[in-house]
Image: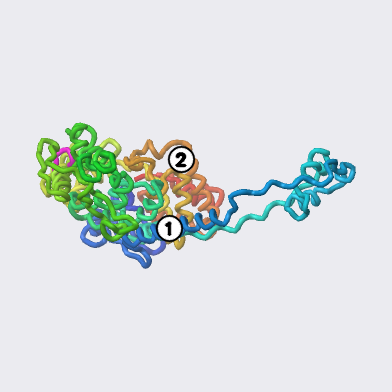
Amino acid sequence: MARDSQAALVALNRFGFGARGGASGDLINAASDPRGFVKAELARSYGALLEAPGLQSTPQLGQAAFAYQDQVKQAREAAKAATPTEVPAPQPPADPKPDNQLRRNLSLNTVMTEIAGQMTDAKPAADTAMKSGSMQPNAVAPAPAKPSPQPLNVIQKTFRAEALARLQRAMLVECGFTERLVVFWSNHFCISASKGELARMWAGAFEREAIRPHVLGRFADMLKAVEQHPAMLFFLDNQQSLGPDSRAGQNRKRGLNENLAREIMELHTLGVGGGYTQEDVTSLARIITGWTFAGRKGQLGTPGSFAFNANAHQPGPQLLLGKTYEPTGLAQGEAALADIARHPSTANFIATKFVRHFVADDPPPALVARLRDVFVRTDGDLKALATALVDSDEAWKAPLTKMRSPYDFLVASGRLLARVPEDPGGYLGNLNLLGQPLWTPAGPNGFPDTAAAWAAPEGIKLRLDIASQMGARLGPNIDPLDLLEFAAADAASIETRKTIERAESRQQALALLLMSPEIQRR
């Protein structure tokens, strides 16, 4: 069978994270059967699951976070109790007229000694010395010693462990299509670790538990897992939402929080213009009142686990999108989500976003229509959706004009350089620098997914800085032309090849390779 390097480049860059360096042979393997190479990952039904030593479940992490917060609170209270509430005023010196002539000859060290409390009349002496100008004008106080770095707390350790597991998986997989699907759906159903300690603690577990098991499953199942996950409930404040007529609502004189309901309809399913009204948002908010997570006291269940609080649930039937949902408690909300998942607007919204992510910023209408039909016909089978994308001619013929996100760029670079991280710190720092901090978008709409969002001059300059640092560190021991063969072979442009050949050093050549369209574009 003839090998197609250009199609192999599309297979690896459009659908995956790019070729791995070393002896992987990814480009050669993809060139023999590009579509089969990509679809092979879809045949591994459990390929998206991520397990690693030390990664814990959301309830376990919640309990650890609650325990840590309790320890911090106790430490603060103990420190406050140990601090005297009133400090006695300093006694004036016995002689109301200090000997200014003697004070003028004090050195800075003497004054500092007095300030430190090692002389009985410290404060008056220091004040007098300051007023009389006795401090030596050229004296320099010794620099304070740098405080030793604080050990990481359990929340920081957990976040870094989750990040490392995700990065290592992305570096090691053959093509990376399944991992790209994980990244897509995780950004679609995003939370933000900046919300608070629980969000940071749960960010990785949310992806492992609510996203990964359903990437090749049904959309409705992923939707339910996402909206019932403690991380999403915490992120969008649903634990604060009380049915106005519920027992808790009446007792606490509080009512609905519509955050989760609004984002379910606007960002997760129907999309803007998807045929819903503000009344539908309010109805859905009523329907999912009581969806919460058990707190540290465990009154509703195991701390950190999903819980349905019947006392907070709005009683009575609710009208949503023209259908009445009977008051069946938790099942009322689950039935509403199942129907929204099957709504025609959801199919169109998901198909459009899916094609925009993988193919072009302006999605080809015919391809969107076909994927929408697949979504409807298969009842939201996401494996069928991904397969239809790979089978489409548009996905292979469209030029590689999409810009890799910062995460994609860093992972693609690490794969090509065969650098599997043992510590996530460098990647996390660079993601922050490039404007895509891991699991921390600025809002519930996630990170942008267009070339314009990531191709701004300042962003490109920062990428060049990072590429230059990689070149300086690794360039002396690497032949960039060999890497170009791994990455693109004869699909590489003449311009890229000549640019690398003309570089003044291997370090510069490596930086130029990492900034080339063969690496930056997908």
Q: Position of residue 17 (x, y in %)?
A: 35, 53
Colour treatment of the image: rainbow
Q: What is the quadrant of residue 247 in the picture?
A: top left
Q: Position of residue 98 (x, y in %)?
A: 85, 43
Residue 355 visible in rendering: no
Q: Nearer the viewer, mark 2 or mark 1?
A: 1
x 55%, y 51%: residue: 505
Tell me which amino acid carries mark 1. Asp
Secondary structure category for the residue under label 2: helix
x 70%, y 51%: residue: 143
Of helix, strand and loop, which mostly describes the magenta segment? helix
Marking on residue 459: 2
In front of the other: 299 or 350: 299
Point out the stretch of residues depicted in magenta.
342-346
Marking on residue 70: 1
Residue 203 visible in rendering: yes
In front of the other: 161 or 224: 224
